[in-house]
Image: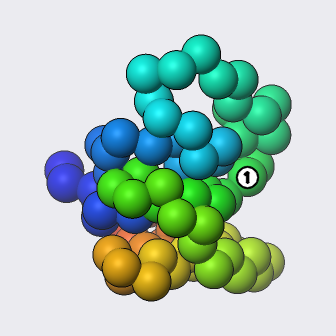
Amino acid sequence: MVLPAPVGAGVYNVYTGALENTDNVVPTAAQLGLEPPRFCAECGRRMVVQVRPDGWWAKCSRHGLVDSADLEAQR
């Protein structure tokens, strides 16, 4: 399974925007799966995020759109 660039295995933490190799704390809500990604994993830019009752979508200006429904379908 290959995740889209904005939430895939990148250099940046998708919840904090910090470099992955630094000591950063992931928020508790994110650890529980209650928080959508806020930063692009590829470039670290802040994404436009829309939360809806059945999920969320996030859009990076450089790497495109990812929808939580698409991620669930890949499971």
- Can you say whether 30 is above or below 24 in the image? below
- Between 13 and 29, the residue placed more toward the observer is 13
Image: 41 above or below 45: above
- Give the residue at the far top of this rendering: 23
Residue at mark 1: 35
- Please state which amino acid type lies under the numbered disc 1: Glu
Q: How is the image coloured?
A: rainbow
Residue 44 in sight here: yes
* Callout count: 1
| Residue 33 x, y percent position in the rendering | 67, 43
The residue under the point 52% across, 64% down is 45
Q: Secondary structure at mark 1?
A: loop
Q: Quadrant of residue 11?
A: top left
Left or right of 50 on screen, residue 68: left
Q: Along the line of sight, which residue is nearer the eye, 52 or 10?
A: 10
Asked if residue 12 lies left or right of residue 74, the reply is right
Q: Where, by quadrant of the figure, is residue 26 drawn?
A: top right
Residue depicted at 30% across the width and 62% down the height: 5
- The vertical placement of 63 against 6, above or below, is below
Percent from the top left, x then y, of residue 27? 77, 34
Q: Position of residue 16 (x, y in %)?
A: 66, 43
Residue 32 seen: no
Q: Residue at x 36, y 79 (%)?
A: 62
Q: Nearer the viewer, residue 58 or 45?
A: 45
Q: Residues within 10 Å of mark 1 (few under 14, many from 20)?
A: some
Drawn side of residue 7 relative to residue 38, left or right: left
The residue nearer to you, when weighing 29 against 71, is 29
